[in-house]
Amino acid sequence: MAGTVDTTTRRRAEYSTDASNYRVVPDVVAFPTSTDDVVAALDVLRELGVPVTARGAGTSVAGNSVGPGVVLDLSQHLHGIGAIDPDARTAVVEPGVIMSSLQGEAAPHGLRFGPDPSTQNRATLGGMIGNNACGPHAVAYGRTADNVVSLDVVDGRGRRFVAGKGDPTFAAVPGLADLVRENLALIRTEFGRFGRQVSGYSLEHLLPENGSDLAKMLVGTEGTLVTVLGATLELVPVPKAPTLVVLGYPDMPSAADDVPVLLRHDPLAIEGLDARLVDVVKRANGADSVPDLPDGAGWLMIEVGGTSPGEAREIAEMIVGASAAIDAAIYPAGPEATQMWRIRADGAGLAGRTPAGEQAWPGWEDSAVPPDKLGDYLRDLDALMARYGVDGLPYGHFGDGCMHLRIDIPLESSGSVLRTFMVEAAQLVAKYGGSLSGEHGDGRARSELLPVMYSPEAIALLEQVKALFDPHDVLNPGVVVRPAAVDADLRRPAAQSVPSTAPIGDRGLLGSGTLRGVAKKSGYAGFSFAHDHHDLTTAVHRCVGVGKCRADNSAAGGFMCPSYLATKDEKDVTRGRARVLQEAVNGSLVGGLTAPEVRESLDLCLSCKACSSDCPAGVDMAQYKSEVLHRTYRGKLRPMDHYALGWLPRWARLAGLAPRAINKVLSVGWVRKAVLWGGGMDTRRDVPHFAELPFRTWWRRGYATHGVPGLPHRDMPGKPASAARPKVVLWTDSFSDSLSPSVPQAAVKVLTAAGYDVVVPDQQACCGLTWISTGQLDGARRRLSSLLSVLGPYAVNGIPILGLEPSCTAVLRSDLLDLFPDDPRATAVAGATKTLAELLTDPSTAPAEDSGWELPDLSDITAVVQPHCHQHSVMGFGEDRSLLADAGATVTELAGCCGLAGNFGMQKGHYDVSVAVAENALLPALRARGDGEQYIADGFSCRLQAVQLEGVEGKALVEVLAERL
């Protein structure tokens, strides 16, 4: 085998779970580079009797893609798309092809693959084949099984064959034709009773009246019978003029009652949404992320198509007329329809928390019943949940009778409640003639419950089928046949609590190598994690593995996860890091938070905070990394870069005593390299120049030197302010003060022109950002405590605080609250701190109408604009985007990190990844700029990266505005 084989503890931790409740640690993780590699690996493992589980993106919510022995990751290399035949409407793919990649290749031919699960921008075709994935448009196009022509497979006996349609393909599996013939009545009565009966094996496809289609039967067998090496898939025409109808109902069951009538109009999709899920989306993404919905507490999203927008509109109006909805809205293709589908796509992650914010778990997230029974099933399911006192956010493919629901079953200590609930839920779905799974498969979550749904004779038939393909049980053991228990191998109960309020020296918090000789200190060990019950374990288990961080989110305006986009390694994605942290708090595989596996896993995290907003589960890896570094090095000697970069504001103040001399010395090549090397930094970097006149010095001198052109001379501090002019605090962070003073100087000019009375506090107020990013949380707290003393009085008196550096502004809006959760001044400062665009556009702080302020005309400006990661994640870039548009600027807005990310890109060992991240968006955009096109970036790191890597000088937005006053 030419691929990579990895037996390290860290790698095994990354692959110990998927998007399910289950944890099974493999012995080996292998990355085959070709189908020949896969066949060779399977031959060896079969001979040795070692179990093997094939895996794609690892987004399975039923535990289908975890197992003992060896895990084969087919996603890293086996992602080739072969011939697309537009006439036959087929495509040939390898198992690791991401579904959205196939859609992109097929689109120029006016074609697409029909099934489209919400995880399509990271889910692989191999995984979709394994689970028989469906998605919203299965109403029109069917399940994955319905869109498979043939499969290139290897079974558990080592036989490689192409499975297709017709009796001849049965010859590859001796005994299969006889088994089907002997059980025709059983198959006809128990299998394929309705469209979403996915649980078990779909033996109905083997019936002669269904074409004796072995390929379709193998779809949904979850890797327990064969390993898929390739597939030929059917494609369908891209629908014309798609139009979305949204119908409002009093509740979800009432919406479900209406589905059978609406199906008569041949819709492309019928999706159900609950008001509670919509509320969560609004809280997570902002109220403007959801269009105005029809009245109701439950909605149906119904997509229709037509040969023209007019025809689609007519069909939509017919559906409205036929429905029993209390209100309705019709959205043609456009922003509002896109927003509605985004709600649905984010459901897989957002539904991981209940309306009250509690962790909700999969397990019973994929049940299905015939559509005409869905309303009554939902009412009974609600009653069952009420009896157990549990909650969740329901949504699903109502057109197919499929319901998705994660539930806050208590899993912190055991799976006993999970087991009893699942048994009763299985009995309920069986009562309605339904299926335990409607598209996600049985996996470890539901396989044990198959006897509730099937007769003993049917279960025996499943076992006989398994014996024909995999008699020694080496392929994905513990799933479907001879299943593992529902409550076995659960991930969450194995994790130990790591409270943030416990004394940091307590045994168990740090694993091996705990602090010796350091006095125990009560209070918060680091961050409070107030939003996760003051427990780091609860925080890291926010990651349920939906894998949105594995997708290229830049097309959707997302920023996560920049290091993964550069390396394509599970080690460097948010989910992979979360898995290692979960194993660290488990303690049985990774030896605590100080273990080398943890440091290796977190090393390439840029601390960009993008996951805190882009991850639907709200994972904040930057915060976890800071906490781990804090617990690891507290009271110990730290890496040199923690002092060189983590104490940067200190060095900047010292450099301010003789900036010219410091800059001159550091311009000498060997001195610069020696300083960088000694400080733990990469010698290919340059040292930023320190300002010869820091902003605060310039301010104290009353603009006496290096003044901003066009700004009237100001008297020395102490001059009474005009009572008529609203005050605004210009907070000058360390970067703006010492490294980029032209930014706050420009802010003075803009604020004065806008009619504000600018206040610059006499005392410097540092946010401690560099201390936070290097995990020096004690130092960060000291600086933020001082900052609260300086800025707190202004905030509590309602005076807005303008932040200029996005990363520092983000600290005041987010980390400050978690480090000082009980200090009302922190809440006041967080609420008062604004970006420039927020200040100028918020009605409560915008310039008064009689101030004479007019937004400068930027209509002749064309610019590449780089939103800072922390601004995107914490404050949002919407106000800046609107301000630039209102000013008339023509912009190319980038999505993704610049790659420098504060201290990250300066540290030894990070340069190549930093450059690779910049190549995702920033550097190509800078190279493609036209003559005179500007680069606008509020982040000092973003501007520094552009200068050092491409020689392009950037400006902050406030500087651009100041130049046009």
Image: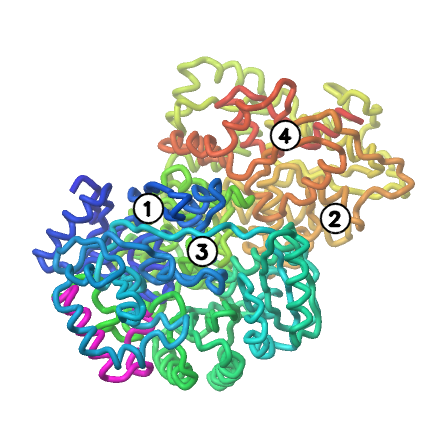
Residue 787 is tagged as none
Circle 4 sits on which residue?
936
Give the number of the mark in front: 2 or 1: 1
Distance from disc 4 to disc 3, alpha carbons, whole Å, reads 41 Å
Figure quadrant of residue 694: top right
Distance from disc 2 to disc 1, alpha carbons, whole Å, reads 64 Å
Distance from disc 2 to disc 3, alpha carbons, whole Å, reads 57 Å
Q: Where is residue 389 in the image (x, y as percent from the top left)?
A: 49, 82
Q: Earlier in the sequence, mark 2 or mark 1?
A: 1
Mark 3 belongs to which amino acid?
A: Gly
- For mark 3, give the secondary structure: loop
Distance from disc 1 to disc 3, alpha carbons, whole Å, reads 15 Å
Q: Is residue 924 above or below residue 618?
A: above
Give the number of the mark in front: 2 or 3: 3
- For mark 1, give the secondary structure: strand
The magenta segment is 442-471
Q: Across the whole image, how many numbered discs are drawn on residues?
A: 4
Residue 517 is at least partly visible in this image? no
Circle 3 sits on which residue?
114
Q: Which colour scheme is used?
A: rainbow
Disc 3 residue crowd, few under 14, some 14–19, many 20+, Cα 10 Å = many
Distance from disc 4 to disc 1, alpha carbons, whole Å, reads 44 Å
Q: Would you say the magenta stretch is mainly helix, strand or loop? A: helix
Residue 794 is tagged as 2
Specify the farthest residue to the left: 47
